[in-house]
Image (tube, rainbow, N blue to C red):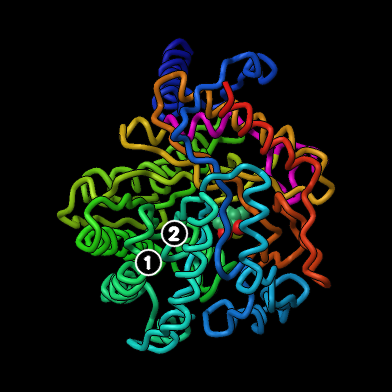
Amino acid sequence: MKTLLIVIAILALIYAGAIVWFHDPETGLRFDLEGLRADSLRFGREFLWGSSTSAYQVEGGCTNNNWYLFESEKDNEGQPRIRAGQRSGQAADHWNRYKEDIQLMKALHLNTYRFSVEWSKIEPAEGVFSDSALDHYGLVVDELLANGIEPFVTLHHFTDPIWFQQRGGFEREDAPELLSRFANRVVRRLGPKVRFWSTINEPSVYAVNGYYLTEFPPATRDAAKAITVFRNLLRGHTSCYREIKRLRADAQVGLLMNIFPFDPPSFWNLLDVVLAHYLNRGFSLAILDYLNTGVFEFSLPGVGSTRFDSGVREGFDYVGLNYYTRLRYRFSPFDGGKFAEVQTLPPSELTDMGWEIYPEGLYRALAMVSSRTTKPIYITENGIADDRDLRRAAFIEDHIRVANRAIANGMNVRGYFYWSLLDNFEWAKGFDVRFGLYAVDYATQKRTLREGSKKYGEMIMRASTR
Ligand code: IFM
């Protein structure tokens, strides 16, 4: 009996030790958000205050990319891929209304604008480049500069030309070269006027949603392919980085990564704690390590692993951080998948995306990036889907206050971009969720500033008039 008790005690100690070893000490970080409001604002004069969009989500007229095809597809149950069979169509017609939209930015005192160029419009067929599409983006850049707004251009934001998808997309080993050939054309055209370039938006989301969760095209469930695509996107970043720097040595070139800090639903379950550890490593730290060292090491037990060395160390000038919420996953090999998302809050407390509002997660994400680099960090996306506009103002203020605290604690945060300037086509959710600082009435294309968005303009004014 005594021996049995000793064995049980030893096992319990090992179990507890393993939990302590794998558990992230920042899990559950909480600030006194009211208290943060007393901090003085530390955003310097050079701080970039912006909003973000992506071409497919707001421009309209994207009829030559993989999402256009996806819009008319059905899943295995015969359901449309996009909620209720919606189509992006003219979206917010930003292609034609960019001048009006730039005035909307000015009204909120924004000094930068992050937008993406649509690959399928610029290179409609393989190796064929459209001067008129390039000219269009040239006009957008000119209009921004004429209004004192710094352009911050993303080359790849989830969409691929149809010809590229048909060739195998990022599954192919030559995808990085095709992407950097496109980058070459864009940078040759816009480069003299654009200093800030982002290569790829959220590579892990593109890979996981398209090749594992089936939410994005090509809606495949194949872990090995997802890992290959993830790796090739990172390789694509590096080849674009080199190409852009070759064309404009003083360009600031970065990768945009989303960080959802992964937390275990409960601390006593070692499997959940270990899973959170691997998810944070695989989807966040592995990208940062790749940027620093050129070595991409991805490993998720039971799913797959890869190792790749690009030979390029420190192939980035800044990190773009997209932050929205944290996620909790349970290790669940017996109910259909390997992992299951768990939400512990009631729906009434969640955003319209079903996400927890957790400003402290922004601090944790910034700390994660800062643990790997002292280079500038731009918060390139942060925002709330809140159709009724009940929580937008507090969301904006709390997240900016958290960024302020991160700066006070020595993190090199240089910019904040709200997602999104306008209501946008939210991928498989269509037009149903509303992130915009400005509401868009899609019948008339009328833009209306949401009450809660005024807080953003006020914070910018307060930060700049200290
Ligand atoms: O709309 C998306 C964007 O395209 C990429 N980051 C997250 C946003 C909100 O889901």
* Helix, strand or loop under label 2: strand
Few, some or many residues within 10 Å of mark 1 (<14, 14–19, 20+):
some
Which residue ends up furthest to the front in the rendered image? 146
Which residue ends up furthest to the top in the rendered image? 2
- Tell me the kind of residue under disc 1: Leu
> Which span of residues is magenta-colored?
344-367
Q: Residue at image x 46%, y 24%?
A: 407
Q: Residue at image x 69%, y 79%?
A: 89
Q: Is residue 90 above or below residue 438?
A: below
Asked if the residue at label 2 sits under 8 Å from ligand 1, the reply is no
Q: Which residue is mark 2?
A: 153
Asked whether residue 65 is drawn in magenta, I would say no
From this viewpoint, is residue 315 visible? yes
Q: Which residue is mark 1?
A: 190
Residue 215 appears at what percent x and percent y? 59, 67
Q: Residue at image x 58%, y 44%?
A: 110
Reading the chain from its start, which is encountered first: label 2 or label 1? 2
Q: Nearer the viewer, residue 462 or 238?
A: 462
- Tell me the kind of residue under disc 2: Val
Image quadrant where residue 219 sits: bottom right
26 relative to 253 in the view: left or right? right
Image quadrant where residue 169 sits: bottom left
Tell which tag, 2 or 1, sits nearer the viewer: 1
Q: Is residue 10 above or below residue 76?
A: above
